[in-house]
Amino acid sequence: MHLSYQPSPIAQDILAYLIEHPQAADTLEGIIQWWILEQQIKRWSTQIEAALTELVAKKLIIKRKGSDGQIHYNLNHRKKTEIKALLKGDKG
């Protein structure tokens, strides 16, 4: 079956949420807060993981295993000046 209608990205998020939760019903505010946010988080999670890997490789952030067994990320304070320059767009 060929569909000529291509839903917008937000419309796709709404439809994906409803397929995963077929009994769902909510207000505009609830849809914004829960449905769309959940779909965005799923889409972003792999991109965020890749960005963290990149930042750790560049030694801009530090990755460590916490006492809770979880991986924690934080600023590499030794790179603070370099990070500020990056954020300002300096090519230095």
Image (spheres, rainbow, N blue to C red):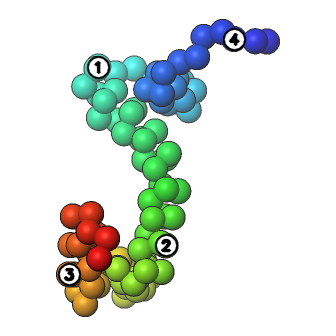
Across and down, in percent, residue 68 comes to 38, 82
Residue 16 visible in the current orientation: yes
Disc on res. 27? 1
Q: Earlier in the sequence, mark 4 or mark 3?
A: 4
Measure how far apart labels 3 and 1 are at the Cα level: 45 Å
- Number of the front mark, 3 or 1: 3
> Does residue 23 appear in the picture of this structure?
no
Q: Position of residue 80 (x, y in %)?
A: 22, 81
Q: Residue furthest right?
A: 1
Q: Is residue 38 left or right of residue 92?
A: right
Residue at image position (40%, 32%) is 35
Residue type, numbered disc 3: Thr
Q: Disc 4 to disc 3, how far (Cα)?
A: 52 Å
Instruction: Assign a secondary structure to mark 4.
Output: loop
Residue labelled with disc 2: 53
Chain-order first, disc 1 or disc 4: 4
Q: Which residue is mark 4?
A: 3
Figure check: 46 above or below 19: below
Q: Amino acid at mark 2?
A: Thr
Tell me the mark number nearer the camera, choosing from 2 and 1: 2
Q: Residue at x 43, y 80 (%)?
A: 58
Marks 1 and 4, how far apart in space? Answer: 28 Å
Between marks 2 and 1, how big is the CA–CA gap? 37 Å
User: Which numbered disc, 3 or 1, marks the residue that appears first in the sequence?
Assistant: 1
Which of the two discs, 4 and 3, sits closer to the camera? 3
Residue 81 is tagged as 3
Q: What element does badge 3 sit on?
A: helix
Front position among marks 2 and 3: 3
Badge 1 vs badge 4, beta-carbon distance below 8 Å: no
User: In this view of the protein, which residue sits in the foreground, 70 or 9?
Assistant: 9
Residue 7, given in percent of the width and then of the height, sits at: 53, 18
Amino acid beneath label 1: Thr
